[in-house]
Amino acid sequence: MTGGLWSLGGRLQLLWDSPIIAGTALAMLAPWLNSVSRWEGGLGKKSLTVVSVVVELFLLWCLVLTQSRGPVFGWMLATAGGILYMMQSRIPLRQSILIRSVTTSAFVVLALSLTALRGRIVEGVLLQDQSVSNRLDIWSASLKMLWLSPWRGIGSGEAGWTYSQWFQPDTSQYLYTGVLNGFLEIGIEQGVVILWLLVFGIATVTLLPWFCRRFEFRSEIGVTRTMLGWCSWVSLMAYFTANLTSSLHKSPTLMALALIDLVAFVVVACLIRDRRAMLRAASGAALLSTVILFFLRSVSLYDSREITVTCDHGAVVLAKTKSSAGASAVAVLVDRSVLGALFGRELRQSLKDSKIYNSMIVFDPRHALPQNQIEADRRVIITGRCARFLSLFNPDHPHDFLLINPEGMPTRFPESWTVQVWLPGGNDLGRNAQWFAIARPPKVTVKIRGKGGQLLAGGLFE
């Protein structure tokens, strides 16, 4: 917890990092106050129930003040699922739990209608809220990102960065840290097998109470067991649902709460020992997970963009959907300090505008080095510190290089190479002079190309 009581936008965040995390934590904690209903009866126990109701309403009021639509809808959907289960339940506490759940749901609806959250919901429904429209763009791209490296994933922490570089619309210039969907993000970064296992586990937890009637024992131990399972189930459903609109799996606090819920639910399931119900729930979950994965794959096949993105041994391959006749490919070795944080946007735009090239293979040294993946006659663009990888290229093969602000002192190049060097003006006149000293047109040419961030002005291809 590193945030303040309120965010800069006037949303309650209760010392958490963001209002969304605060809202999700509140949505997960509120259902557990229903467990007090287990001890109803007697004046003292009724007073305890009243106190628990007041505390629950306070937590839900705070949830609404976070103005976080995902956690609020997550809590409402989870509570609706709990109500449906209790409606067909036979435990003695059925009526009191139903009344309490319906009352708290009505309270949340009333509260959101009286607060700023109502405006955010209306804007979201009408797609006037940029956070909603951005999410739709990100999720659409994420379906394609799932299959960039389907078995191994693209690596932890890379989903937001990959979207920002290769899939973000040209009208947006934001460097994302995630794809605002915890499940898609895990699938993109860890692979579709991990995603299938995750969805399978969640689906099993979701379906088990509906297959297992032993949650409804009328004995004292059975009622306690049922309430423990019900509270943990509703809390988990709130967490899972909120993860559909945010990358909440990165929060240690929420992960700890989810693990507590999961342990409680698993303990109840193990105590019940209804193997037939567990088998049916697992079978249904496996089928559902497979159907979801095939659906995601079929949707991802539709692509109307001008530039398609694929992966090849860690390198990113950009290709025009409408290739020009006789066009060829170009390779780029990127140094982020030279090309900038959103260099992928610049590279995509340069490829779109090019009449010479129809595809581009991009090497980021963090993930892939060129070595044998670059053909001898292909043009190679090398930026900044990536100039050290020139030693990987065979000096006897005819290469065509463009060096953009290369790091290090100039050196002589093999006679078989054609080299063009772009340097920023007013940066290091002494170093620039040394580069001009080794210029040997037309084989080696050097030019000043703008200042600083203007190196790419006008595109990469002249």
Image: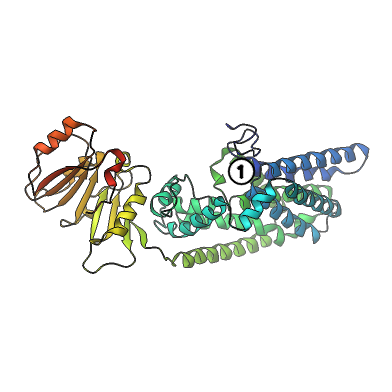
User: Visible in this render: residue 262?
Assistant: yes
Between residue 275 and residue 43, name the one nearer to us: 43
Which quadrant of the view contains residue 436?
Answer: top left
Crowding around mark 1 (Cα neighbors within 10 Å: few <14, some 14 to 19, many 20+) is: many
Three-letter code for the amino acid on which mark 1 is drawn: Ile
Name the residue rendered at 43%, 55% in the picture. 169
Q: Is residue 320 left or right of residue 178?
A: left
Image coords of residue 205 (percent x, y):
64, 55
- 286 w.r.t. 239: above or below: below
* Image quadrant where one finds the N terminus: top right
Image coords of residue 409 (percent x, y):
16, 34
Q: Is residue 236 left or right of residue 302?
A: right
Name the residue rendered at 23%, 69% in the picture. 325
Q: Is residue 159 left or right of residue 413?
A: right
User: Visible in this render: residue 335?
Assistant: no
Which quadrant of the view contains residue 276?
Answer: bottom right
* Image quadrant where one finds the C terminus: bottom left
- 308 w.r.t. 38: above or below: below
Between residue 170 and residue 147, name the one nearer to us: 170
Image coords of residue 407 (percent x, y):
22, 36
Q: How is the image coloured?
A: rainbow
Name the residue rendered at 31%, 57% in the picture. 317
Residue underneath mark 1: 20
